[in-house]
Image (spheres, rainbow, N blue to C red):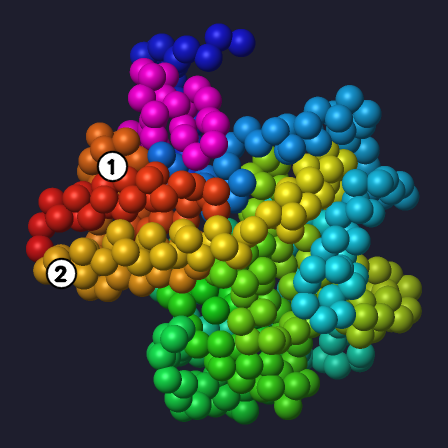
Amino acid sequence: MNERLSAADLDFDRRHIWHPYESMRSPTPVYPVVSARGVRLTLTDGRELIDGMSSWWSVIHGYNHPALNRAAREQISRMPHVMFGGLTHAPAIRLAQRLVELTPGDLDRVFFSDSGSVAVEVAIKMALQYWRARGVEGRTRLLTIRGGYYGDTFQAMSVCDPVTGMHHLFAGAVSEQLFADRPRVRFGESWDPSDLASLEDLAARHGDEIAAVILEPIVQGAGGMRFYHPEYLKGARELCDRHGFLLIADEIATGFGRSGELFGCDHAGVVPDIMCVGKALTGGYLSLAATLARPHVAGTISAAPGAAGVLMHGPTFMANPLACAVAVASVDLLMESPWRKRVARVERELRRGLAPCRDLAQVADVRVLGAIGVVEMRKPVDIARIQRRLVERGVWARPFGKLIYLMPAYVMSVRDLRTLCAAVCETVAQEPA
């Protein structure tokens, strides 16, 4: 296929293709990509951009990695896909073995799906079926914290922040969940136990309604890019144990090293009852996710009589062999690499490179954790203008709301990291105060 895109092609895109979170009436400009290698995207006009987003946080090893390419080629020549109902295959088994080995504690029951949002849907179904299987009526609500993001499907959306999570657009259709105040104590600050007061209050007042607490461990991702204290996560685990709730950890963004630990839960030494993983699972090659559960969750659901003992979910492309084979290669590549040193290097350069933004009047905050760097503006940003200025400086990022943030591949060089941060600082400095 000819990769050159004409003006007519781009006009067709503008008029007919819906991009994420875009209006079909006045879409923001898109930049046509023809290839990607390492940490660089090549546009049709020949310009190269250093990718500061690792394609929404998934391409942790860089693009076109030889080991992942090889795994994909070998698997596609054997069996690119086969249904998972009534069948199994080596890539799914090997991937499940690695997930059981690497995830915290006894999370040893694995359900594969095809996206992070679906993994969260599955986790919520598990929690609801768990209580039904125990013969407990009324435990149908979820307790979470404001500022979260869990995906765009309906149950996942129901636990996203009620202000920024589109609830008003779907009033009456979105399940009404319980929202505690977002944690105030940041990662690295002195812990204050009163930070848990709002969560504890809702748990005490609505305990008979709550099936599970769902959290993004340590890092609240697309809901605001905030980093909270590990003691909050420990407190949430203790609260769940005290009240008998399940704890669901959404590790889709934080899993596989992004925050400096292999999983966000590892910062607190916490084992959730259910965990969701995705994004970096395949190194950004194919869409794949998994929901893991502890034995007591899976055992309780399976012990229910009749159809109630069957987890009621089964995507067509569940455990796709091609995706699983690439995921095995990606996980192995990560674990065989000096990933902790690499993430620490990214963190060091993000801290150094974004620090000048702190002195700008238009900047409210700068924060960094692991391979995540965030510049929070005082006012919402003009996405199209910011992206144009970044592209002019040879870098790619995708701001939203008041945030200009970076989540680069772990393998990015110091030189590229410095170029990336300098471009952000120069762009931010041009914004109105």
Residue 88 % position (x, y)? 87, 42
Tell me which corner region of the image, top left, top right, bottom left or bottom right, holds residue 61.
top right
- Image location of residue 205, percent across then percent down: 52, 90
Q: Residue at x 34, y 39 (%)?
A: 416
Q: Looking at the image, do the residues carrying marks 1 and 2 touch, with CB atoms under 8 Å apart?
A: no
Total numbered labels: 2
In the displayed structure, 133 sits above or below 76; it is below
- Tell me, yes or no, if residue 323 can be seen here: no
User: Mark 1 falls on what kind of element?
Assistant: helix
Within 10 Å of the Cα at label 1, are there few (<14), some (14-19), or many (20+) other Cα atoms?
Answer: many
Q: Which residue is mark 2?
A: 359
Judge by depth and name the residue closer to the eye, 200 or 327: 327
- Residue found at the far top of this picture: 2
Residue type for callout 1: Leu
Number of residues whose C-alpha sits closer than 10 Å to that of mark 2, classed few (under 14), some (14–19) or many (20 or more): few
Q: Which residue is mark 1?
A: 390
| Segment colored magenta | 24-49
Quarter of the image where one finds residue 396: top left
User: Which one is in front, 390 or 433?
Assistant: 390
Relative placement, left or right, of 385 versus 407 is: left
Q: In the visual, does 360 lie left or right of 317? A: left
| Amino acid at the residue labelled 2 | Asp
